[in-house]
Image: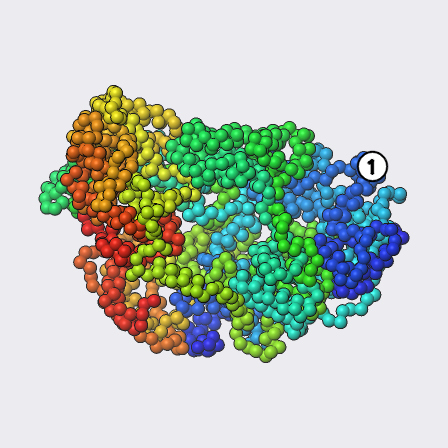
Amino acid sequence: VSETEFNEAPLVDAVARERFRTEWDRNFAVSANAGSGKTTAISERLAALALSPDAAERLRRTAVVTYTKKAAAQIGLRAREVLMRRAREETGGGLSALDHLDRVFFGTIHSFCLKLAQTYGQTVGIHLNPTVVTDEGDAALWEEFVEQDTMDFASLDAPEIEAFLRHVPLETVFDFARQLDSATAAAFRRPIGPRPNPSTADCERLLAIVPKGSGRKNILLSQERAKAWNEAWNRGAAFLPIYEPAGSAQAVVECAEAWMAPLKRWLAEAAAVLAAELAERYRAWRFERGVQTYADQIDAAMAVLHAPVLLDRIRAEGWRIILDEAQDTDPQQFAVLVEIARPAGAVVGTWPDRGGVPPEPGHFCMVGDGQQAIYGSRADVGNFSRHLDAFRRGDGGERLEFQVTFRAPHAVIELLNATLPEAFGPAHLRNFGLPPTEGAPAPFLQIGYVPLAACPLNSAGDVCRLPLAEPARESSGVEGWLAEEARQVGRWLAEHGPAGVGARRWD
Amino acid sequence: VPSPRTELLLARHADSAWLGVVRPWIESGRGKLERGYIVVPTRGQAQGLKQRCLEDNVAVLGIEFLTPGLARKKWLSLVPTGAADALPERSPPRPAIGRELLLFGLRVLIARRLDALAPSASEWGLLKSLQSDPERALDDFDELLKNGFSADDFSIELLRDVFRELTDWVEQHGYAFAAVEAAAAGLHEIPEGGPKLAGRALVYGLGAEMSGEFANVAAFVRRVNDVTVVLPEPEFRGRSDLDERWVEIWTRLLGVEPLPIDAPEPAKTCESVGAIWLGEPGNTDDVDVLVGRSRGDEMRWVCDRIVSLLAGGAENIAVVFPRADASHFQLARLLGERGVPFSDLLGTVGSPPIDVQVQRALLTFYEREGRIEDLLALWPLLRAVGSATLSVADARRAVERSFDLWQTHATVRHLDTWKEDAPELARVAELLLPVWPAPLTLADALARFRAVCDELDIEAPEGCGALDAFAQKNSDLFPLNAVAAAIASFLPETFPVANAISRNGFARVSLTTRRRAEGLAWSHTIFVESNLGVWPERRDPSCWLTDEDRAALNVRRSGRSLGLFTADDRAALERLGFIGLARNTRDGITFSASLYSEEEPEARLGPNSWLERVLWARQEAAGSDEGNLFDRSAHAYPISDDADPVELDRWTAIWNGRRDPARKFDEYFFAGDPARITPPKLSAKLIERGVQDPAELWFQAVLGVRSVDWEPFVRARRKALGQRAHELLASALQPASGTVRGFGEMPARPEAEATLQRALAELRRRWPADRYWDSFHAELEQICRTLLDNVYAIEAGRFVATEVWLPAGAHLPLASRNFPVVGRIDLVRLDRPEWRGAHVDIVDFKTGGDLELSAERMARNASSLQLGVYLAAAASLGATGGNVWMLKPEPEGVAKLGFEELGRALAPLAWLDHALTSGVYGALTRDRSDYAPEGCVWPLACTPIPAAILERKFAATFSEPVVGETEEPAS
């Protein structure tokens, strides 16, 4: 099927697509599922903007940001191709609009933050010529930092530090400290109070367990260790690692966890405080060395935005942001992009949650799909949802849905629509979404499922369903269930061979 | 410029300029003993004009080609120091300060200001930013000076202050700014009777982009009596005002009206190709487009195109690169391989001479206060100059060992250890040390630097005269990094490759850049790398002198300056420059581009804006509407297949055989003649690792190759704890009194505890008093005490030896032979002071990992096989019974394996016997993964074969279950 045929196919979401393409003075949050043509949609909007009468002014300060350099470059290229096609179709020639596209920033969010910091940040002391190190590549840098650091800490009292170091090597906070961004580190620096004692009752429960069965030897050993640990605790001073039971007898493990829980919680809090202090020192040292991590780039942009004069200067320049892969954008990154699109004088951090003024019309669009979030460790789907909700209620813009997918056959789409809503629904027994607030019980937060629609030109396709058996033993967490699923699918594939899925051979 | 002859001419085409002005000008000097100067923008134009002279048989005797920089030297030569009338505004003239010293001065001034400020001060932030980017600020300052502005014209107050201070600093040290001097010499009339250069001058091809050099050229022109200036004719389109103002400035300088040259326009030109870029109607008949799948492909197509053009009689071909890069290097190589003569105006640069590389590495060593990794970076260079002979691998291993011991990167802390362990490393380190103090004077730094160069027997740094002169004038103390950067700035980073192909020769093909090709007539021009984002390149201004600042300053520019270029100005001038090249091309233009990025093969590239429009115009002309012409133009370069098919088949069979799971390991895969490759002995540890992955044995024992990790030196707490615990326990458990063959009475427990306590205290003093080492030491103490408890919990003989090497004669009783084995045991306890007839207890301290000790595990996956080997070796020495113990630093962390279990535990050694006998080892190397945090595993097979295939090959070779294949049952 040719591109032209696809372009001319009647789509159920054609109105949404056309609105996104042509309504440049409105903000949109586009929910675009896999294969729905996000890149094309953004490119179409840019091309239409470039062909508009005031394109030079609008595109002079337009930034299209996404997660990889490659994706950003592809959007840029695609926009040019679309523009040339449009130019031929609608204007009958003339390519001066291409010059306007030359002015658009296409890049990653990190490179955009770097640009912001380097362009505007000199008065707040931004490093203008940094060497960027990857998370993996800073081992030598960290080592250099650690060696020259005083390794003295002011954020905890001396007895607290000694109490911490009695149970945990200081080095255990290092990995954490290396990765902390500025805002998180600041949030961690708070008083933690004195170290609690382990729960005596839980220890006694552990010692009272009657050893029996195949685990008898380990239970006895665990109890001996518990006594030794208690004695060492009471003696004080010497290094004393957290108690670990021998074996995996459930009763012993539960008692041990309960026994150590108060101490572990305190140690975790103390580790966070120490890591935060170290992270701050590491950040300052990096600055002196002219080295930036990706997180530093975001921090640098945030530092600029927290200078009201600079922020208003940036806002006055009228930046227009199109954010792709919004679901993988972490809260700090979101904040940078949102804040520069808001009107001068808007108080930082007051939109979308605190009733503040939203971004200027036409200055902030985001395209994403929560169901495709892949950066679980750093992105915050909750944050993405908050922005989506704001647009849904008309605060700052509108929400559009691209339901049509060009990627999957009709039969697959029908199956997905029939099965996924239930699988991701709050009523599902194993909903591995995020707690709506920290520590909240199920039902967990999941991005609402947006039913897919097939492009009429998609192939018919075929599906078969492989029911998975409930494992004898409950799996643990997403990885555990995934491994179980992989085992069962692998077994089935091994049994049925390529013919089982209609293929001739595997390679 | 009052002179006997002054002309200002405007040329639209290079060919017309050549015929109408340049050639007649050169020829008019024929037969006269008269000096003539031709001032051109770059050496590219000089080369081009010389070649044209050669082609047209025009003699250039007495003609000297000058770039603006060389013209500056000419007029400066007329200004002897102290000559009151040399420069209208300054007397006597001062030496112009170079950029290197200026940058040093700026860095020092910023550092001084920061020293006096707290981070909370309002100026601190801006100064920190300025400190991070002084180069661009200095570029902006230079641009201000060249356009008649000064430090007072920066829009940021603090910047004004800093650069005023810099101006004063320059004055105080007796220097002048080159731009200011040039302005004084060029923009003001010289006094009556002032010195002049003999001869005549032709200024050719200087466009508005060269306005920064205007003052220098004007100063030269003022000192010549016979001047002809040929400027590009204004375009009257795009940002034409710059072209027009450029002509006005010259008109004002020369005092004559510009005249169009009197020469016919060329009959044929590719001007219309340039017009397409400006959105004007154009013609693409003379355009070829070459799109490679990759940049490499593109260059191969370009090379073919050049060969074909030359075969068709092309007279002179310009191959225009955006910069000297890998593609340029590749094309130069391809042309060389095809025997195509070419002139390379980009030049091939390489590393500087080895002595300079050593000098730069030395500076890094001192700037970073003498770190071991910088010493190791220096090491191969020192070997190259003959100042060191120890192999890099041995040096690295020695440093690794001492790093494990000292846990610091400061070279000085390792010195004593190296004196014992690696004397050559110590010798060189002693030559390099002490590290430079901070702060220090420049003179001190230069003296130290020269002294160490002398000690290492390398050349002293050359070309530092200006720095030496400055150092004599100034005895201030400067920050170490500023001093090191200043010295480094006088050392070349790159060096022209002496034997590069076809540099500066005359040829029909010129590899050049747009700036170097402008103003010359070409029969064909090839614009390579015509991809979006490669060229044209938009350069944003720095934050120190923004476009807004520039526009505001330009309002009050003098009539002798074009003003400060904004990013738009630069982009427009660059575009006009390219279009000018098209205009000066007669027969055809070729654009070449790549469809995919070489660095990121999945990233598709697009055409640049000119090629994009050319393709569009071509489609319009053809009435075609078929998708993306750029993509459709892309072709992979066919790979020539001139390999010997028989040889190719042979190697293909070998290649396939290595990957065939059913095929046994053979001589092409970790196997050889056992008579020649069998190692004389093996260590117990290597036997364990070799059974788990025979490739380990192959590399280490058969080939004698050891891996040298080149990872950063980072503290590994667990490893350091283990090493220190082993040392401390060995010290605490040493025999109490005299020994027989290394064995003596086991010390009583209180005695061992006291020894341990003393050793721990001694060790703590070795490291800094901080929380990190407090924490480390507390854990170490706990490990040592627990292990000591466990040692004394064992019922064993009263004779002990620590860190015992297996004596000669220890062997493994394999089915086919007794095979010598070596190894060092943490602790051995005997019931009599000799092995023969003794009950032996071998103790191994395990401070890392969660290994268990059992005959089953040993037999199944060679887990802790090393310990079983020790016990078997003890038996071979005559021990009559005993155990091997694994002690862990946890209460009751004791496990043992007895003599009676050895037969079962050592089952994997059957494979070893097979391998030693047959010479076939094979491999069971784990799969590599791009995502593995530790990167590639050692040993690497020379081709990566999946572990699953290796396992099947292994089974096919040895016809028995594969070690490690069986999953561990859940405990």
When the figure is inspected, residue B487 is found, relative to residue B664, above or below; the finding is: above
Residue at screen point 34% across, 35% down: B720
Amino acid type shown at disc 1: Ala
Residue at image coords 86%, 51%:
B34
Q: Nearer the viewer, residue A384 or B882?
A: B882
Q: Position of residue A413 (x, y in %)?
A: 33, 72
Q: Quadrant of residue A232?
A: top left
Which residue in the structure is indicated by mark 1? Answer: B83
Q: Residues within 10 Å of mark 1 (few under 14, many from 20)?
A: few
Q: Is residue A111 left or right of residue B557?
A: left
Between A390 and B158, the one nearer to me in the picture: B158
Q: Is residue A441 above or below residue A75?
A: above
Residue A270 seen anywhere in this rendered image of the structure: no
Instruction: Tell me the residue at 60%/62% (across/down).
Output: B338
Note whether B89 is above or below A32 in the view shown: above
Viewer-proximal residue among B656 and B172: B656
From the viewer's perspective, tell me whether residue B78 is left or right of residue A71: right
Figure quadrant of residue A466:
bottom left
The percent coordinates of residue A300 (x first, y second) are: 49, 47
Q: How many marks?
A: 1
In the image shown, does A64 or B702 lie closer to the viewer? B702
Task: Classify residue B231 as left or right of residue B549.
Answer: right
